[in-house]
Amino acid sequence: AQKVTQAQTEISVVEKEDVTLDCVYETRDTTYYLFWYKQPPSGELVFLIRRNSFDEQNEISGRYSWNFQKSTSSFNFTITASQVVDSAVYFCALSEARSNYQLIWGAGTKLIIKP
Amino acid sequence: DVKVTQSSRYLVKRTGEKVFLECVQDMDHENMFWYRQDPGLGLRLIYFSYDVKMKEKGDIPEGYSVSREKKERFSLILESASTNQTSMYLCASSLFQQYQGNTIYFGEGSWLTVV
């Protein structure tokens, strides 16, 4: 069974639109960590955010915001006023004790921002 | 900033060649990783290391070996390259911290083509 599900394979929006990338996870651990990474066409995976299971506060960083909801096992990522430079593949990942804190990756969502 | 440097960005090797992919990190991280990434298959862990001279198999270790003689350096070795090892290889490092988990930082990636 998928432990990290990114149901949106590809999303295409026009620049300046807001877009939300979904991530649903599954774990039995009470302590776990969730991550988002960005992979632009150049290939490097860039760490964006980490959230631990004890902290359900939403986070905002510039045009980026993250909504963590334990009740629905979701950790969604919203880009406000999208820009062409946001075009990338975005990965959600889970780290849990029973997996020795190795990252369990979602399949990724390819985001295309059209000018 | 964490810096993970991979020695080669693009390589073309012949079938049967021995291939070395080198990776260096400058943050004194204990953990280092080698992943490969293929379209449709996502990120797959090849090997990881928690300490100098220590290595653990990941999900797809067959056909690969690793070496960690110094804390900052982690090498991936393809003993006899085959065409099915054509892929992008990503090196990463991390430091596990209580309440912060195991945030993994990646290098730029090495695109290997075996002909």
Image: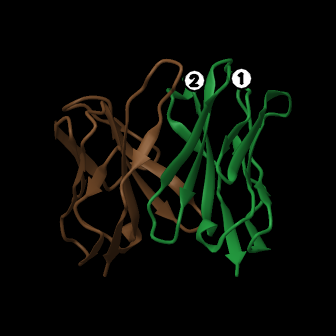
Chain colours: A green, B brown
User: On screen, A6 above or below A85?
Assistant: above
The residue lying toward the viewer, choosing from A46 and B88, is A46
- Labels 2 and 1 positioned on one and the same chain: yes
Name the chain under label 2. Answer: A
Decide if residue A1 is in sight here: no
Callout 2 crowding tier (Cα within 10 Å): few <14, some 14–19, many ≥20: few
Look at the image and tell me in which quarter the N terminus of chain B lies: top left
> Which circle's residue, 2 or 1, is located before the other in the chain?
1
- Residue reaching furthest front? A62
| Image coords of residue B40 (percent x, y) | 61, 66
| Image coords of residue B113 (percent x, y) | 34, 76
Three-letter amino acid code of the residue under disc 1: Arg
For disc 1, the marked residue is: A28
Instruction: Indicate which disc residue A98 carries.
Output: 2
Three-letter amino acid code of the residue under disc 2: Arg
Badges 2 and 1: C-beta atoms under 8 Å apart?
yes
Q: CA distance from mark 2 to mark 1?
A: 9 Å
Decide if residue A43 is in sight here: yes
Instruction: Report the side of A4 relative to B69 (left or right).
Output: right
User: On screen, B63 above or below B58?
Assistant: below
| Image coords of residue A11 (percent x, y) | 76, 68
